[in-house]
Amino acid sequence: MKLVHRNIEKDGKGTITLIPEESEDMWHAYNLIAIGDGVRASTVRKVLNESATGSTTSNRVRTTLTITVENIDFDTQACVLRLKGRNIEENQYVKLGAYHTLDLELNRKFTLTKDEWDSVALERIETACDPTKSADAAAITMQEGLAYICLITSNMTIVRAKIDVHIPKKRKGNAQQYEKGLAKFYEMVLQGILRHVNFDIIKVVLIASPGFIRDQFYEYMFQEAVKCDYKVLIENKSKFLLIHSSTGFKHSLKEVLSTPVVMSKMADTKALSEVKALEKFYETLQADPDKAYYGINHVEKANDAQAIETLLITDSLFRCNDVKERKRYVNLVDSVRECGGDVKIFSSMHISGEQLTNLTGVAAILRFPLPDLDENDSEDESDDDDDPKKCDDKSGDKKKNR
């Protein structure tokens, strides 16, 4: 992402102009743009022209519109961001107040206006405009007839290809059809790697499978590389790492990224730091449950006691349409940092982020035990029972299993 212009007042209101330069920048834009924001961008509009005789013709013209965002649609696979809202600036082709849909495009600038740029949004800008960011790793999870080719970037796990091939079963005394099916499957995976993995950026390519599928494929791949002169594979042979996984499905990536070998290989990546933090949370939850809490109410109480050592929170919570609710999470992040705590903002597109989302999206590892939090929560629940107007908190706490 390229930062073109920035103008933010002391009260937090202002505009920032950005140019998305690669697909992942659309993910950053999705996390920055909220309903109610103003977005100015170039777009194509269909215009009807009426002649003196009453006949009409239509043509498409490129114009620049500014809309107030009312709906946000993000295609995670194609990395396309579509914004719908009402036009709020004079335009010769579009009336004031008319609805229009803006498609944010790569290498075309857009200007984002917010009534308040909070600390999380500004941090997202810094991350997006960091020139050192890149796809840290590629991963292929596979089993017989099924493979997923994924890119693990600093913010997303993107499935670039799913390969699903029927392989005939082995028959006694005749395995020819089976071997043909397996060779076809391996060839499709190989071509997928060549098509989707940029070895100029990728630091490591993980190949994970149950059994010996990964070893057989690895042997096949480099035999073909020599035969067909795939120099890019031969030159980057040292980047491949074979790892055991329980299945060939995408969710096995969490298991793969947790292995010590992969951790040492990917020691400097953001993806790994998230996995480590989540692993530490689970370990603390089992070994010393009074030092690990999840759910916004428990975590806020721990923060009031200045007890949070590490805060784990998913970026999806900052996309809340309720401004008051969003500020609640932003204030929590700011408060933890002011008290010297470490904040890990998980991407909801990562395997680790999906897991944290299942734990309400917010969790904390504490500096010291707080056994009274559960007792206080029980008292709060009793008070809530007496209040018929009290509604359930959608992001409410889940109690720890003792």
Image (cartoon, grey):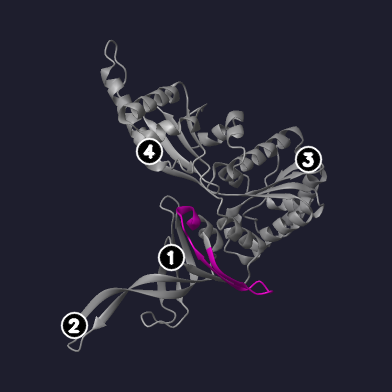
Can residue 374 be seen?
A: yes
* Residue displayed at 26% across by 18% down: 176
Q: Is 24 covered by the magenta stretch?
A: yes
The CA span between labels 3 and 4 is: 49 Å
Mark 2 or mark 4, whichever is nearer to me: 4
| Residue 20 versus residue 62 in the image, above or below | above
Percent position of residue 132, x then y: 56, 50
Which residue in the protein does label 3 denote? Answer: 290
Which residue in the protein does label 1 denote? Answer: 108
Percent position of residue 87, x then y: 45, 77
The CA span between labels 2 and 3 is: 76 Å
The CA span between labels 2 and 1 is: 35 Å
Q: Earlier in the sequence, mark 4 or mark 1?
A: 1
* Residue displayed at 40% across by 52% down: 78
Q: On the rendered structure, is 380 left or right of 66?
A: right
Q: On the rendered structure, is 9 left or right of 140?
A: right
The amino acid type, in three-letter code, at marker 3 is Asp
Q: Quadrant of residue 108?
A: bottom left
Which residue in the protein does label 4 denote? Answer: 194
Q: On the rendered structure, is 57 left or right of 195?
A: left
Outermost residue to the top = 173
Percent position of residue 101, x then y: 41, 68
Q: Earlier in the sequence, mark 1 or mark 3?
A: 1
The CA span between labels 2 and 4 is: 53 Å
